[in-house]
Amino acid sequence: MTSLKQILTDIVAEAFEACGIDKKYGAVEVSTRREMADYQCNGALAAAKPYKMNPRQIGEQVMSKLQESSADIFSEISLAGPGFINLRLNNDWLANRVQSVAADESGRFGVEPVADPKMIILDYGGPNVAKPLHVGHVRTGIIGESLKRLSRFLGHEVLSDIHMGDWGLPIGQIIVEMEDRDFDRVYFDADYTGPYPEDPPVSVQELAEIYPTASGKSKVDEEFRARAQKATSELQEGRPGYRALWQHFMTVSVADLKKNYGSLQVEYDLWLGEADVNDLINPMVDQLKKDGFAYLSDGAIIIDVKDDADKKEMEPLMVVRSNGAVGYEATDMATIVQRVRDYDPDFVWYVVDGRQQHHFKKVFRAVYKSGIANPDKVSLEHTYNGTINGPDGKPFKTRDGGVMSLQVLVEMVIDKARQRLAEIDSTAQYSAEEQEDIAQKVGIAALKFSDLVNHRTGDYIFDLERFSSFEGRTGPYLLYAAVRNQSILRKAAEEGLAAGTILPPAGDEERELQLKLLELPDLLDFAFDQRAPNHLCDYAYNLAIAFNRFYRAHHILNEEDAAQQASWLGLAQLTVDVLKHVLYLLGISVPERM
Ligand code: ARG
């Protein structure tokens, strides 16, 4: 089914054409003033100048064409102000559309899969091995997950990749620190080549302590740093003991990442990382040198990435450092080599902190310039995110000023949800297991919705009280709205009442709800184009509000007219299905009851 906006645009465009005016002026938008119109077209104003006509005169002509062609669709066509064409849908026509969406059992709610599916690689999360996930990994994970679900639902082919930071200096630092702490010698003895113990010599908890110590030492102790750098290059070159250690780090970290991102329902198709492109780096560097893009400078291999239009200085990108180690830029470039080779994507979206904009600018320039990626074939986009801040406006910290781990943050929101649910005392009669499941869902919804409701590029302040409230634009409110709607339907079913054909709206509240339901396809397209899940949040909230108003205006369960009652039940069912689906696209699950 085509989107409503598209259908109306086609109709109005045809009317413009019939008046001898280019049909591009026929674009129709949802009206922001529902008391005036459902949809409106502002094309007469834009066409006035090129056609040297008065906009109202164009409007009059288009209107009379519309009256001829589409009297069955519109109940009212009017001209407002300097030439806005206002359209109000005929109630029968409106209800028919809603009914056909409700009758469609494919679970697509009137959203057609895109005609031209794209291949999209979504790079998000980007945790660093051996470092616990922290608050900085929350946004990238949940925004990326939502973009994945949205794109996939629209019919695109999507692969999500966690792209672990598993190959740089931090690993070298940990290796040296472990050597100094007398971990099993087999890993550090250059003459020993295996076999190595099967059990990991460290746990994630230990790594979480070892890494910051090592990185702290590296900052102040020059000798330590030099050893860590050397260990990093040796690891990258394949020293067996270091590779064996690295493998252990990966095993324990990946298990921990799966658990922690799993608790947020953030899931990946590919568990690749920087290390996976190690073998692509040398051939890439050779090619870059051969083609004259990379050259030696002070012992390092660099690529110029400045552009004539740059206002600020743009330093060259360092592919290989003078000590032979390859860094973040090189692995990101080689990852593009690999992605283009293996997946031939149309898009690569990097949902990564906005503070890395400069890094991506350089990497994208280098790969486009050198032909590693063809700008006409693949669009590399840093779909960046802002930070979660504390009340001081700086990245959110623990009470004592430490790094807030993701696990602690998740526990905090779930605790708060338990407390809130206990206060309203609505779940006490359920089993302990169900209560816990509800608390988890409410907590995760609180965290995710409050994050996603902000445009991804902005920062926001973490406010647990507000995020976990059952009122306002919050995850818990939306869960509550969906659950309440579900319970109405359950009650109806118990009374033997079933949903039926959706009838023309019985009042403004119902009309608004029907119109809202038909906005879904356009809304999803828009969120996709903007790479911005916050539009889904706004939609979910507005849909819940529209349902509330409708529900207050009509007593569904007491209605005496059976056809009317069945119609309202059908509308309630469609609303809860759409609401739950939009929440699903946000990565939020709804409990059966709460
Ligand atoms: N590991 C990186 C960091 O913590 C993020 C990786 C993001 N993805 C990428 N392809 N660079 O900063």
Image: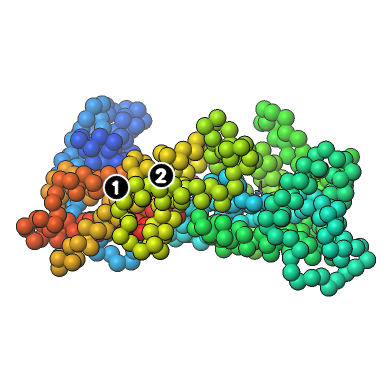
Q: Quadrant of the N terminus?
A: bottom left
Q: Nearer the viewer, residue 27 or 168?
A: 168
Of residues 291 and 163, the one nearer the viewer is 163
Q: Is residue 17 visible?
A: no
Q: Residue at x 30, y 53 (%)?
A: 426
Residue 496 image point, x, y percent: 15, 68
Q: Would residue 251 be visible to someone looking at this image?
A: yes
Q: What coloring was used for the rendering?
A: rainbow
The disc placed on residue 468 is: 2
Residue 3: percent from the left, percent from the top?
32, 52
Q: CA distance from mark 2 to mark 1?
A: 17 Å
Instruction: Assign a secondary structure to mark 1.
Output: helix
Q: Is residue 61 above or below residue 49?
A: below
Q: For the residue marked with disc 2, what is the amino acid?
A: Ser
Count of labels in the image: 2
Q: Amino acid at mark 1?
A: Ala
The local secondary structure at tag 2 comes to loop
Which residue is situated farthest in the left direction here? Answer: 560
Residue receiving disc 1? 544
Q: Position of residue 592 (x, y in %)?
A: 33, 61
Q: Is residue 212 left or right of residue 159?
A: right
Task: Tell me what residue is drawn at x 23 percent, y 46 percent.
Answer: 548
* Residue at the image position 31 percent from the left and 30 percent from the top: 45
